[in-house]
Image: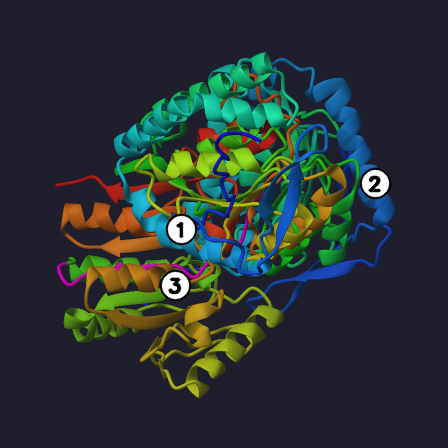
Amino acid sequence: MVFEYAPAPESRAVVDIRASYGLFVNGEFTDGHGEPFKSINPADESVLADIACADEGDVDRAVKAARAAFDKVWGPMPGRERAKYLYRIARIIQERSRELAVLESIDNGKPIRESRDVDVPLVAAWFFYYAGWADKLPYAGFGPDPKPVGVAGQVIPWNFPLLMLAWKIAPALACGNTVVLKPAETTPLTALLFADICRQAELPPGVVNIITGAGETGRMLVAHEGIDKVAFTGSTEVGRQIARTLAGTDKKLTLELGGKAANIVYEDAALDQAVEGVVNGIFFNQGHVCCAGSRLLVQESVADEVLERLKARMATLRVGDPLDKNTDVGAINSAAQLAKIKELSEAGEQEGAERWSPPCELPSQGFWFAPTVFTGVAQSHRIAREEIFGPVLSVLTFRTPDEAVTKANNTPYGLSAGIWTEKGSQILWTAQKLRAGVVWANTFNKFDPASPFGGYKESGFGREGGRHGLEAYLNA
Amino acid sequence: MPDRLAVRKTYKLFIGGAFPRSESGRSYVVTDAKGRFVANASQASRKDARDAVAAARKAFPGWSGRTAYNRGQILYRVAEMLEGRRDQFVDELRRTGASKTAAGAEVDAAVDRWVWYAGWADKLSAVAGAANPVSGPFFNFSTPEPTGVVAVVAPDSPLLGLVSVVAPAIVSGNTVVAVASEPAPLPSITLAEVLATSDLPGGVVNVLTGRRAEVAPWLATHMDVNAIDLAGVPDDQVQDLEEKAAGNLKRVLRPLGDDWAGEPGTARMTAFLETKTVWHPVGV
C-alpha cells in the first residue's frame, strides 16, 4: 500500500512583494539609472517585481554614501555600539524569519524546508555570532589595535541569496567597515527586504548599501577606486577576472569560488548513513552549492550495493513546488542555469557515462531538472571535471585509500570533501591528505558561523566564518 | 704573484637538492661594489624555472608530511650550519659593499631569523588553528596547512632578506622556488650549500639566479605554483605579475616594504597557509 502525500503549501500571505524596487543607498530606496530588469519565480516563470539596475553613477553614489558613513559614523563608533546594531539585526531576522524564508523560496526556487530550516536560521546566527566580535577585536589575534579596512564591495551569488549576504555583511560591519553589496540579478528580493530590516534596526544611513544589477554592475563596483576591499562568491571564471582587475591596487580580496567535491565512501562505512549523506551532498539546494559533493568516490567492493541503495533513495525524493513543505528538490534557479545543466549532462552521455534518473514528473511551467546520477564516469569526463551546479552526481570507484585521495585531489578546485568510514584513524588520515578547505566526515553540507569556510587552489582564497573570517575585514 | 692560487667557487643554481648550471648555458657577471669582477653567476631560464617547480612539487608531500617538530629541528640545523660559515658570508656580503660590522650584523641576524622560525614550526597550529564551538553535535576543528609550492621573488637584501622570505614559507611545510637578488646573487648560492647540508630534503628550497624580469613571469603564470611572494619585485612590475598570477588564482603576497632587520611577525607565514576545517558528528 502506498501513502500519497497531500499538498502542504506554505502560505504566501506572509510576504508583500512590491511591483518595483529601487536601489538602497544611504538609507533610502532611490531610482537606478540603468535598464531595469525583472526578477521571476523560477518555479512558474511568473514575474515577481521590476528591479532597478545601478549604472556607473549609481555605483559611485553608493560607494560615496558608504565612505561618508565609514568616516563619520560607523568607523569611529565604539565596537560595543556596533555590536548592539548587529544583535538588533539578528533579532529582527528571527522575528521575520518566516517572511524571509517564503520570499527566498519564491525568488530562488529552493524548498521551503531548506530556506526555513537552514538558510534563515543560519543568517540570524551569522549576525548574532559576529555581533559578539565587534567589541572584542583586539583579542582576535590580529594585533592589539586592528583597524577596519574601509568600504567593502561585495558581490554575491544566487544560490543562497540571504545567507551569502549575511556571510559578507556581518563580519564587515562587526569590524567597522561599511558595505556596498550587489545581490545576484535573479535573486535580489531578500537582500532588498534586508534593507528594510536595516531601517527597522535604525542602522545609520550608508552603512549598508544594496545595489542591484547584473555582471556589469558588479564589475563597476569591484573596480571602483573608492572600494578598499572586495569580497566575491561565485564562479571561478569571474573570480579570475576580479583578481586581474585588482592587480596592482591596494585593495584586499577574498574569493569563494567553484568546487567539484569528492564524497569518499569506504567499504566499512555505515552505508545507509552514507547514502543519506551522498543524497544531501548533491541534491541539497538542487545541487546549486559550490561545496556540493558532486563526485561520489565509492570503494569498488561496495559500489553495487551503494548504487542500489542510492537509486532507491533517489526514487523517494519529491521534486516540485518549492513552497510545499514536503518538497525535497525545488526549481532550478534560472533558464540559463538549466541550460548549462542540460548541456553538461548531455556531454556526460556523449562521453560514455551511463545516465539514470528516477521516474519523476516535473511541472510543465518553470525550470526543473530531475535528480540524476551518472555511473561509469572516467576522471577525464567533463562531468567529473567541471562544476555542474545542479542535481547531477558523477560516480567513480576506487580500490585503495591512496587511490581515493589521489582521485579526490585530481581537480583544480579544493573547496570541500566528504569521508564516510567507521574507522577513526582512516578518517583522520584521509582528512589530512585531502586538499580541501572543508572536510565533512560522516556528515555533509554542514555550516556554522563559528566554523571557517573557504577553498584551496582555484576554489579561491580567504575564509569566511569564525575568527578566521575577521581577517579579511581588518588591517592588523 | 701569490705563492698559491686560490681555488674559486663556481656559482650554479640549486634545484632538487643538486647544483646544476643553467640548462641554457648562460651566465652573467657579478661585480663587487667597486665594479670589479667577482664571479659568473648562472642565468636561469624558463626551463630552469619549470624544473625548479617540478622539484618543489615533488618535495611537497614529503616535507609537508613531516612532523612539525621535525621541520623545526631542520630549520634549527640550518641556523647551526649558517653560524659555522659566518666568515664566508661576511666576506661575500662585504664584496657587495657592506662594512665589516654591517656584514657581521646581517649574518648574525640571518642566523637568529632561522632560530626564530624554527621555533614556530610546532606553534603555528596553536595560534592559527581552532576548535570551533558549532551549534550542533559535531566535533569541529580548523588547522593551518601549507598552501603548496610558493614562488618567492627575493628582495635585494642578499642574505637576511632572502632568509626572511624563504624561512616563513617552508616552516609550515610549503616548498619554495626562490629567485635570488639579481645584483647580489652569490650569498643565495652559498646559502643553498648551507641548506644542502642541513637535512633539508632536496627540492624543498630551490634557488634560481639570473634576471628577475625574465624568470618571475614564468613562475607567476605556472599552473603548478600555488602562491607567489612579490617581496623583491619593483613597483612597476607588480601589476603585471599579479595579473599573471590570477590565471590559477595564486595567493599573492604584495611587497610590504619590510624592514628586514625588524621583528618579523607572523604575516609572512600566514600568507601561505590554508585553513582546513574538519567536521565529525558526536554521538554514541
Q: Which mark is residue B16?
A: 1
Neighbourhood count class around disc 3 (C-alpha, 10 Å): few under 14, some 14–19, many 20 upward: some
Q: CA distance from mark 3 to mark 1?
A: 24 Å
Q: Tag 1's secondary structure?
A: loop
Write down the chain letter for disc 3.
A
Q: Which quarter of the figure has residue A277?
A: bottom left
Q: Which mark is nearer the camera, 3 or 1?
A: 1
Q: Tag 2's secondary structure?
A: helix
Pick the quarter of the image with the N terminus of chain A: bottom left
Residue B196: tell me if it is visible.
Answer: yes
> Of the residues shown, which amino acid type is indicated by label 2?
Asp
Q: CA distance from mark 3 to mark 2?
A: 43 Å
Which residue range is magenta in the image? Answer: A253-268
Which is more N-terminal, label 2 or label 3? 2
Q: Are marks 1 and 2 on the same chain?
A: no
The residue that label 2 is drawn on is: A60
> Of the residues shown, which amino acid type is indicated by label 1?
Gly
Residue B84 appears at what percent x and percent y? 38, 23
Residue B180 appears at what percent x and percent y? 57, 40
> Mark 3–mark 1 contact, CB under 8 Å?
no
The residue that label 3 is drawn on is: A410
Neighbourhood count class around disc 1 (C-alpha, 10 Å): few under 14, some 14–19, many 20 upward: many
Camera-side residue: A16 or A354?
Answer: A354
